Image: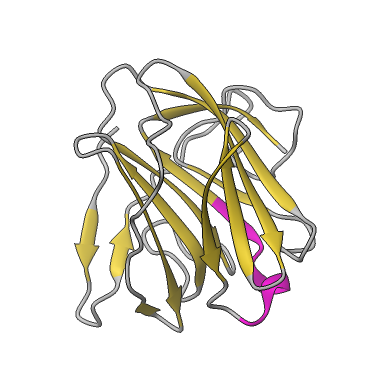
Amino acid sequence: MAETHRVTTQGRKRWTVPQRHGADGSKAGARCSDAQTHLAVPFRGHISGGMQPGKKVVVVAVVDSRPDRFYVALTCGCGTNREPPPDVALELCVRFRDQQVLRRACVSGSWGDVEGAVPFFPFIRDQPFKLEIHCEHGRFRVFVDGQQLFDFSHRLTSLRDVDTLWIKGNVTVTKLA
């Protein structure tokens, strides 16, 4: 699926997130749960109660056979189908071409600096992975297959407002928890 990114006149990145419908006609990605398999990507789901220290988000997925990149983001509110909300607590971008794991945040519509240093690149085409985002006091701690990949300091003050998980790009999601 092709991804589209545009920069608006305010300098914000615009996301194109086409909506897929399940066999019953309902929109895919209505809620996060640990009982779903093969979720439609792009996916947008609600994080019940928002984030808070001690809470974690787990994504189990398989990298596509010809990957370019994929994104995982924690946001405040769902935004619209074409644009993220003005507050993004963590946007994680995995790029295969140059084996980068980039992350950043957007506060009140303004994107911060990109962080990119990681000790290893854990994503392999056609292979499954388990991504865990642990919310702690002062930071998100991110693990892939049980190994710590990076820490990302909180940029937003109200973690409970971080209530939406976005996933898009070259992955097949098999489980969320």
Q: Nearer the viewer, residue 166 or 40?
A: 166
Determine whether 150 is above or below 96 in the image.
Answer: below
- As drawn, the residue found furthest toward the front would be 119
Region in magenta: 157-165
Q: Nearer the viewer, residue 8 or 71?
A: 71
Please name the colour scheme applied to the rendered image: secondary structure
The answer to which image quadrant residue 122 occupies is top left
**Residue 28, image x, y percentages:** 57, 37
**Residue 18, image x, y percentages:** 39, 44
Determine whether 64 is above or below 159 in the image.
Answer: above
The answer to which image quadrant residue 137 occupies is bottom right
Q: Per the image, is 163 magenta?
A: yes
Tell me: 125 left or right of 75: left
Residue drawn at (46%, 35%), measured in percent from left and top? 41
**Residue 177, image x, y percentages:** 72, 38
Residue drawn at (36%, 76%), measured in percent from left and top? 112
Residue drawn at (42%, 42%), measured in percent from left and top? 168
**Residue 95, image x, y percentages:** 28, 41
Q: Per the image, is 146 magenta?
A: no
Q: Quadrant of the N terminus?
A: top left
Determine whether 11 is above or below 115 in the image.
Answer: below
Residue drawn at (29%, 73%), measured in percent from left and top? 12
Tell me: 60 left or right of 53: left
